[in-house]
Image (cartoon, helix red, strand yellow):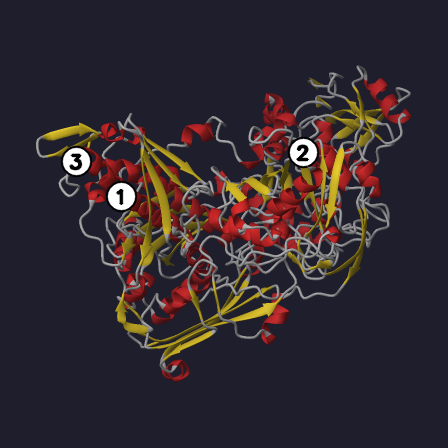
Amino acid sequence: MKSFTYERPTTPAEAAAAVTRTPNAKFIAGGTNLLDLMKLQIETPTHLVDVNGLGLDTIEATPEGGLRVGALVRNTDLAADARVRRDYGVLSRALLAGATGQLRNKATTAGNLLQRTRCPYFYDTAQACNKRQPGSGCSAIDGFSRQLAVIGTSEACIATHPGDMAVAMRVLDATVETVDAKGTQRTIPIADFHRLPGDKPEVDTTLRRGELITAVTLPKPLGGVQIYRKVRDRASYAYALVSVAAVVQPDGTGRVALGAVAHKPWRMEAAEAELPRGAKAVTDRLLAGAKPTHENAFKVTLAERTLRAALNQARA
Amino acid sequence: MKFDTPAGQNPIDQLKVVGKPTDRIDGKYKTTGTAAYAYERHDVAANQAYGYVLGAGIAKGRIRGIDTASAKRAPGVLAIVTTLDTPRLGRGRMNAAYLFGGDAIQHYHQAIAVVVAETFEQARAASFLVRVDYAPEAGRFDLAAEAPSAPPAPGDSGEGSGHDGVERVGDFEGAFAKAPVTLDETYTTADETHAMMEPHATVAAWDGDKLTLWTSNQMIAWHKGSMAQILGIPAENVRVDSPYVGGGFGGKLFVRSDAVLAALAAKAARRPVKVALTRPLIANNTTHRPATIQRVRLGATKDAIITAIAHESTSGNLPEGRPETAVDQTKLFYAGANRLTAMKLAHLDLPEGNAMRAPGEAPGLMALEIAMDEMAEKLGLDPVEFRIRNDTQVDPNKPERPFSHRNLVGCLTLGAEKFEWARRKSMPGQVRDGHWLVGLGMAAGFRNNLLMKSGARVRLDRAGTVTVETDMTDIGTGSYTIIAQTAAEMMGVPLERVVVRLGDSDFPASAGSGGQWGANNATAGVYAACVKMREAVAQRLGINSADAVFAEGEVRSGNRAVPLGEAAAQGPLSAEDSIEYGDLSKKQQQSTFASHFVEVGVDVDTAEVRVRRMLAVCAAGRILNPKSARSQVIGAMTMGVGAALMEGLSVDKKRGFFVNHDLATYEVPVHADIPHQDVVFLDEVDAMSSPMKAKGVGELGLCGVGAAIANAVYNATGVRVRDYPITLDKLLDRMPDAA
């Protein structure tokens, strides 16, 4: 990796200020993704601002009856929290479906939201990739695209958001809390947090330069049956081909978000109105306008069938 | 020692040590991290620098120029050697790809430079500053597109069993046309990478014109010879040392660019240099198991006797590369009067295809054993019974040539009984367990037993310690332990009194590790050296060697009993010999046999396939150490799960490379994919194989597993997938109604 300087501030605003004032600086928390990318020079920060000393590692009840999850709460701890397990089962299950025990011990809530795509062309620096090197082109579109996005894609990029946690947070309507260098706080609905690639695939989220995530807030519990179904080629330690986060109420209504089909967790409230009519009605609506490649067209069918499995499980 | 008549009674038959389930003697070093692998040999040479290998970013073409100016100025950089600095170097005898030198790019991630620096991080950082000017050329990357025009190709697996491009017995076409029941299907297998845990790695140091390589390699004598050939130096100036190897699977049969570039870099930097290949380079810089397209045709009578059998395979490789010998087993496995086998080889500009665990048989059986399952169904016959009915005790191409020992039928019947095969529903899609469709499948397994000359030296000291030295390697297989068991049995000492030293080219040349030939041949070489040592001991002690009994640390003759160490009282004894083979394997066919039984569940909605139970029954001669042999077989079965369900290098047919070149994207089974595995070894010996009466087992465990899984998936779902790996996207559209 390229040499870099390093500092460890003690308050969130200081951290935000450090990244704002230093060109080419980045925050580092668990480092489970950033360090790998730095070794490959896909990320080349010249300054790292280590946020591990900021606290931000508690899970607290909110006055609204929800939970405020500190940015630095580790994935393992969040998944194991008794309140999360009781009231937000979809989130606990999504976390446990991701990575491995070792990685979850290190990975943080905020860092998980910010993990970058796993498109293999993003990782191979000899290949064109608009996300890695804007304007260089996209090798994936006519290359090996089996894992990649089927909807919300652009001519510049068909990468997916690779995570599981964010899919559950999307179905729960979580909000992302941030602070900037001036100490100004902002609340971003999770739906607006990740963006579609459009003609700027290098930008994954709507965070502004130097803006630091301090917490993710979960609204009051939804009840219902909460399911996270992750479909993959092997039983563990693999990215999803398709995942479904679902909260199904006894009356058959509910919420659904899909993972591994788009550049962001994929949810449309309008599609959820179709839930009583079954999985196909929902995914027909949710994936209307999908533009899969020859290699990943199966994801459309798989999404429907995975949702069907989830709904069957909810009824059982 | 020449082995040219069947083995009679010998000291190994005592089975006091050999044949007992024995913990591996190197286990404590591996579990405590004190077994130093190549990249960890910090102590062997002072002042080691780090080399980082740069791979080509195009698949085919030329390099117009390489600009190293800013890389050379980077912190810590000691030297940079580029492919333009040296003419194209030679290559090993069994390789198609050139490893370094010259401006031509043959394949993606071909090594084009090595950057040497004080630290690994500095070398890697500087490598990003190297600017390469390429002149790309169009290449051929699509096997299916090239297959129709591919010419017939003779070839061998690089591990021993060769044959012509087309072989015929009787009149296949005539018999096939007349057969009342026929099958004609095409199957495909994917490119696979070895994905061993330990990357290719080498520390190289020059002392004048003498080169030492501390490396990770399966075949020490080949390595030494190839290295001399590649660098154009005398073989006696090369020493290779590889005592521990963290997996090879055929990927470390040959010299790879880590060793060549470590040597060149050490010369340029005038310091010892260590080099490891990164994961992406392992997929595209080294060798891989080539993809195949296989057509199988079977014709049978109504009572299920095969009358016509044809197996044709097309694979691709670089010019001068070899075909994947996927039709090998079909010459020998089943009876049938009219036979055709053929191989075609397409020119591809992908990385070199070469041996991976059970080359030929592994992909060949993945096709043939689905075909047998399909044919059994057409005949309305149980697939176990169909195989039994077409068993042969002779080489079908040469009926005068029997198998030395063949108990495939025993494997099949015992396996069926243990697995409760009779409970299988022959109609697919009948068994449901919650959201799982459950199916059973089986396949037969076959892998030849290969005989290779193998040498060893045995030393005895006055303490009665027996030291064995051979350049045999232990690639995680248990070689240390079975060699110690052999020496302990032969010299009549407990295991603890034997020291085994492996992997050094200064030791006598052995068979090495490959083609599942290591165990039988290497221990037979140790046997030969021990026979000589027993004679030397008897002579020193004035005992007639024919009367001497070596037991419990003593040499006994009549009423006399002398501690073994006494023979070395006047000085240590040393004896060296090799096992060399006559023509027994020409007179009789030596092979190993297995049956594989598998139960799978297929998710009724998502078509995810998960293996629920596995059983292998193996007939492979004497099992020297049932514990390490079982480890070999369950590891191979796991590899079979990978090949059947998830492993496949994804070819970018436009840009010409394997895209999923790391362990995040090239998925191999994890623990959660592997259920309980049962392994049974038939109690048998094969006196034609060697004085050990053993045969190979490490590759047999893989042979047939993939097809057994494919057949179980069919039994579960009624969906026949003929293209590996059987990922859910190939099932999804054809899944039965979930209801």
Image side of residue B451 versus residue B684, left or right: right
Q: Amino acid at mark 2?
A: Ala
Mark 1 = which residue?
B532
Q: Quadrant of residue B125?
A: top right
Q: Examine the rendered structure and indicate whether residue A255 appears above or below residue B175.
A: above
Image side of residue A114 versus residue B683, left or right: right
Residue at image location 77% in from the left, 34% down from the top? A190
Disc 1 versus disc 3: distance between alpha carbons?
15 Å
Nearer to us: label 1 or label 3: 3
Nearer to us: label 2 or label 1: 1
Label 2 with label 3: CB-CB less than 8 Å: no
Mark 2 = which residue?
B49
Q: Residues within 10 Å of mark 3 (few under 14, many from 20)?
A: few
- Nearer to the camera, B236 or A230: B236
| Residue B244 shows up from this direction | yes
- Nearer to the camera, B187 or B362: B362
Chain containing the residue with disc 2? B
Task: Indicate which disc residue B412 carries.
Answer: none
Whole-percent x, y for residue A191 in the image:
78, 37
Image side of residue A12 versus residue B491, left or right: right
Q: Amino acid at mark 1?
A: Lys
Whole-percent x, y for residue B223 in the image:
52, 49
